[in-house]
Amino acid sequence: MSASPLVTRTLTAEEIPAFIGLVFRAFLEDPLPEHVAAEIDLLEPHRTHGAFDGDELIGGGTMLSKQMTLPGTGPQPVAAISCVGVAPDHRRRGAMAAVMRAQLHSQHGTGDAFAALYASEGDIYGRFGYGLAGHRAFFAVPRGADFQSTVDISDGRVREVDKETALPLMHHLHSKVAPTRVGWVGRTKASWQVFLSENDSELLSEGLTRWRYALHPEGYAIYQVKRKWESRKPEHEVHTREILGTTPQAYAALWRYLLDIDLTTTVRAEGATDDPIIHMLKDATDNNRTVGDGLWVRIIDIDRALPLRTYSAAVDVVLAVEDALCPWNAGTWRLVAEADGPAAVTRTDAQPDLALDVRELGAVFLGGTTVQELVAAQRIRELTPGTARAASRAFAGDHQPHCPELF
């Protein structure tokens, strides 16, 4: 008997628990009830699509309503794609493609102008128009590592408090800093709950403590300790969830505190590829930095998305864009902007300067991947000499984009 055609639609509130259960199964996880409840609280049924085989829900994905910080303009609406999964016994039937298409088409014209996600596997989302727009850096810094003599750790005292005491200040400081960091997203009460969730069985099996909260008057660090004893000697590791400082001095003070914790050997942390810790250390090789993929961005409507940010240099460039999934984006577009000023994007019949797929446009949108990089990788074709260099300067940001949380 052949399988019935799949139907894709938004879910009702009553269908969300079944959807969350399906997603956890797809990712081979056995969540605790409180984790399921926290995820359910995050989802909006009208922004959650399911793929059905008859009456059976076999796959789906959601778009979280987030505000992501863009270069020059601060927080802007983004469709934060999450919980994309297909039941293990229904894969390779087109369910995921149908959901991804439904998400993008639902936002066209009046919804979010761009989308972002983290990829479980890097080769999946390019075919849906997502480009690699930012990276995540992972640091392993040895305990006691010295700072450069110029690093000021201020006089602010770092003290450890419980979660309930820490939360109000962390909420306040995060809401203050997030609008200034490209790629960061705002946090609701529900997203904070997911961000700080803990799995007791996982903590036990991995030898990890619960989250600990270190507060500075102008920052905070969330961390846990991975316990390890070798030959009766402690070689514990500090694993951070987030280190945030509203000033360079506060950030340095929090790092100094973590690096000086007794009984430990290493502080492990995640940050942007241009994180200050790289240059704060007296011995730069102490950071042991590795880099992985971070945010992937998809432009849903070119004419609405590109003006959401400002540009670092004046630009007047004509783009020939291909977009198989969102045909309204395909064609030739002119981008005109003054340095740090508003941008205008219009259709044009002029000869193009650069030819690219929409995934490359998503890759350069946050300023983390340059046009020149993609020309060298033969992903963008430069049709008018010199335009790739000019476009690279325009799209570049002051800092590398980074999002400190998965969604």
Image (tube, rainbow, N blue to C red):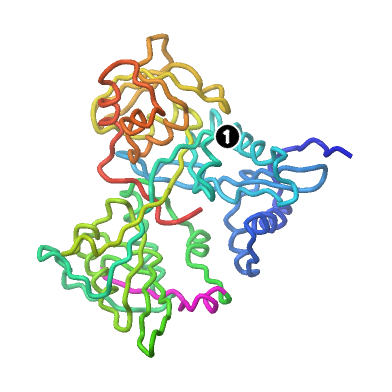
Give how far across and how far down residue 398 sits, in percent.
25, 42
Q: State whether residue 342 is above or below residue 211.
A: above
Q: Nearer the viewer, residue 206 or 46?
A: 206
User: Residue lying furthest front in this view?
Assistant: 231
Q: State whether residue 235 is above or below residue 179.
A: below
Q: Residue at x 75, y 37 (%)?
A: 7
Q: Residue at x 36, y 17 (%)?
A: 318
Quarter of image, res 72: top left
Q: Nearer the viewer, residue 135 or 92?
A: 92
Q: Answer with left or right where residue 156 lies relative to residue 18.
A: left
What is the quadrant of the N terminus in the image? Answer: top right
Q: Is residue 406 magenta?
A: no
Q: Amino acid at mark 1?
A: Leu
Give how far across and how far down residue 188 sits, in percent.
48, 57
Quarter of image, res 304: top left
- The magenta stretch spans which residues? 202-217
